[in-house]
Image (cartoon, helix red, strand yellow):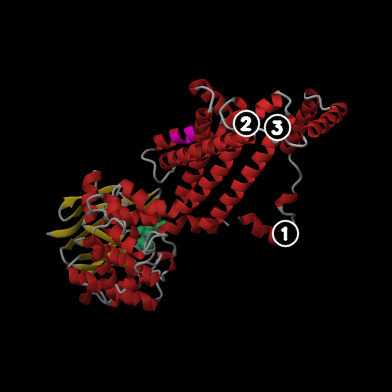
Amino acid sequence: MQSSSASNSAPTPPPRFKRPSMFSWAVGLVFLALFIQGVLVVEVTPGRLAQGAVNLVDFVGRAIPPAQKDLDTVGWAMLETLYIAIVGVVAGVVLSVPFALLAARNTTPHVLVRVITRFLIASMRTIPDLVWALIFVVAVGLGPLAGVLAIVMDTIGFAARFFSERIEEVHPGPSEALASTGAGRLSVIGGAIMPETLASMTATSLFSFEKALRSAVTLGLVGAGGIGVELAAAMRLYNYDEALTIIIAILICVLGFEQISSAIRKRVI
Amino acid sequence: MNAIEVNDVHKSFGELHVLRGIELTIPRGECVILLGANGSGKSTLIRCLNGLARPDAGAVRINGELLTGAGVRRLRRLRRQIGVVFQHFNLVPNVSALQNVLYGALGRQRGGLLRTLPAFAPNELRERAMACLDRVGMADYAASDCRHLSGGQQQRVAIARTLLQNPEVLIADEPVASLDPRAGRAVMELLIEVVRERGMTVLCSLHQLELASEYGDRVVGMKAGRIELDGARQSIGRASMSGLYEGVVRVDHAPSHAGVAAAAESA
Ligand SMILES: Nc1ncnc2c1ncn2[C@@H]1O[C@H](COP(=O)(O)OP(=O)(O)O)[C@@H](O)[C@H]1O
Ligand SMILES: [Mg+2]
């Protein structure tokens, strides 16, 4: 930039000390207005917050000690959650690879295919997992299958995007070298692009699993199987001690798997 | 018969007219050095010879067969007959040197990629790949990840990859430009030796005068997208070779670094 060399000689302040423009003022004012109106609409009042605190203490009092009966039910529900996450993530990651290859600039067969695939991936990412779960509950009924399908969608939305960005970063040289031997398109992708992206894809997949495990927990709240179903039931029946047991089980499981997965991720990168 | 025939080839990148009517004929078995300053269009010409770049106009023939405008099948068949050695080696990272050599068989081996993985490759192919590594003095490094090899070693592996491919024509784009002078000379000697053994037709670009005057049967000189010089190596004096560099503003960036250079300029 020319301005940087100019500013060395002239004592004008660097751009970051520029006074806020009219635009910044306008944006700031609009946000302030929205914030004030928001506070009014959701009725944030000191009285309600105080009442909430009282209720929370009451909840905690009734939840402690956590219930110790039905531990096997909780265990099974947790296991089901784990299965939903595993099956959903494996299917999602496997499907992400072709999606990513179709979406990456350097591997797509046609720009039109690229645009369409990117749009599909963006939709899968933008629609929240709970909404996908609601849709699949309608499509395949209550139960874990709806949860698995929701996680597949969520995983593709997340992983395919990262995969394709990584694929676009791959240096063109090795691919050109393989194409120069007369290799076909798929051989070039498998021989030159995959080896360079595999480590990063593995890390992304493990990260997807951590994400999926957290979302598998909540999917049950809309009836898509797993431990969320038990949690929703316990809360509705005011069995707060049971709810606490479930929450503790979730905490242990999710934390445990995050530890394992981040340990593996550190090793593959 | 001619191995390479280039007729009136033009190529532009936006406003930049890089190849301005190239005429070049290389008979079978000849070893030609393509000399020219940086930016004269050597890489672009070489990339037009195996379809990595498409000329805007003109024709390229390999062994008499038209490459320009070829469909996927014919392009792949022709590419099998043309080996390429790149300035930056272009080995695949994260896989072994042996695997990189085996990739040389991708175009020919039935069964595609799977049959070139060391675990699934036929014994005979794996042995030939090892022999190629041995020929370039890299047999001891068969299992090494290429990122851990020196530049000279990487280029040797790349030459072994081309040997396994066993093409009739070899095009090399400044094969020693990114090596230090000593390693560069050794690799250049090796390259010339192996192509002589196999009787390959060679077009090898160089931008260093010193090397050009030592290798090859014939020297072709490029300047600003045109062929300015063409003749038997012995008959061309150094003075006329030097002429290729006169009035040339040095732009020291390869096309693969053009983006980086542009960013550096604007920074
Ligand atoms: N892909 C490309 N896009 C834009 N410009 C290019 C591209 N490839 C080469 N050029 C430009 O074309 C000119 C000739 O480049 P090149 O063929 O690499 O010359 P040489 O190999 O003789 O140094 C240079 O000015 C270079 O910047
Ligand atoms: Mg070049």
Q: Residues within 10 Å of mark 1 (few under 14, many from 20)?
A: few
Q: Measured along the vertical axis of the image, is residue A229 above or below residue B9?
A: above
Q: Chain of mark 2?
A: A
Q: Position of residue B186 (x, y in %)?
A: 32, 77
Disc ID at residue A10: 1
Q: Residue furthest bottom?
A: B182
Instruction: Pick whichever, B36 or A212, lies toward us.
Output: A212
Q: Residues within 10 Å of mark 3 (few under 14, many from 20)?
A: many
* Left or right: A182 as drawn, with respect to B144: left
In which quadrant is the C terminus of chain B drawn?
bottom right
Q: Earlier in the sequence, mark 1 or mark 2?
A: 1
Instruction: Pick whichever, A212 or B160, lies toward us.
Output: A212
Q: In whole angstroms, how far apart are the C-alphas of marks 1 and 2? A: 64 Å
Per the image, label 1 sits on a secondary structure element best described as loop
The region drawn magenta spans: A117-121
Q: Chain of mark 1?
A: A
Per the image, label 2 sits on a secondary structure element best described as helix
Q: Position of residue A152 (x, y in %)?
A: 49, 35
**Label 1 is placed on what type of residue?**
Ala
* Residue bearing mark 3: A242
* Left or right: B64 as drawn, with respect to A14: left
Q: Can residue A171 be seen by looking at this rendering?
A: no
Which numbered disc, 1 or 2, marks the residue closer to the eye? 2
Disc ID at residue B170: none
Q: Earlier in the sequence, mark 1 or mark 3?
A: 1
Q: In whole angstroms, how far apart are the C-alphas of marks 3 and 2? A: 13 Å
Q: Measured along the vertical axis of the image, is residue B249 above or below residue B64?
A: below
Disc ID at residue A228: 2
